[in-house]
Amino acid sequence: PDEMRADFASWAKLWPFRDNGPSLNPMGAFLVLSDMRTLRMRCAQMSRSALEVAHFLEEHPRVAAVHYPGLPSHPGHQLAQRTMRLADTDENAYGYMLSVEIAEDAPEESRNARTFYDHLDMIWRATDLGRVKTVATLNAISTHQQQGEEGRRLAGIGPATCRIACGIEDPADIVADLARALDAI
């Protein structure tokens, strides 16, 4: 555009790249830098929390299955043990996301899953990932709703599948909220 040719520096500063491009605003740059400085610590804590949560859920009678590579029952566990490590230690970090299938009285329904989901208190009910706050979503009615039943079946997402992205809260607090929601079923 002509305005870009006349004063490129002002154009770049004020228009397309203001929020996330080569001329990031000062507050945005500060937040990105702060996030980068704490990324390793957050990833380690989130992964530890997810492993503890996965162990709790795997033992709960209202849970049909837990999908998390840190569990010995996961088909890719051996590979995950060899490859999923924090870069600067020998500690395994299996990631912060897991999925859980809530046990249903009728397999085609998701009544128990919806009751569980509606009774989460501390855990946010949302569709985004990677927050410092633990987030849960029912994939069949949110992120994968447009795929249809066949698409969800191919993706391994049943009507009672709940994805949990663990945050940096104390794992005992996450487990307590999950236990309270599962007890509501």
Image: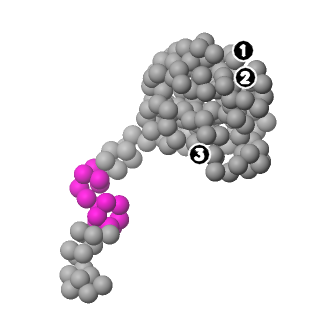
Question: Mark 2 near mark 1, Cβ–Cβ under 8 Å?
Answer: yes
Q: Residue at x 24, y 51 (%)?
A: 27
Q: Residue at x 24, y 75 (%)?
A: 11
The residue at which mark 3 appears reads as 143
Q: Which mark is residue 61?
A: 1
Q: Position of residue 109 (x, y in %)?
A: 72, 29
Q: Residue at x 55, y 43 (%)?
A: 87
Q: Residue at x 31, y 60 (%)?
A: 19
Residue 61 as seen in the image, left or right of residue 34: right
Task: Read off the magenta span.
Answer: 17-30
Q: Name above or below for residue 12 compared with residue 60.
A: below
Q: Let me know if residue 18 is in the magenta part.
A: yes
Q: Name above or below for residue 165 compared with residue 61.
A: below
Q: Position of residue 94 (x, y in %)?
A: 62, 36
Q: Let me know if residue 62 is in the magenta part.
A: no
**Camera-nearest residue between 29 and 99:** 99
Residue 80 as seen in the image, left or right of residue 42: right
Q: Which dot, 2 or 1, sits closer to the camera?
A: 2
**Which SS class for mark 3?**
loop
Amino acid type at image mark 1: Pro
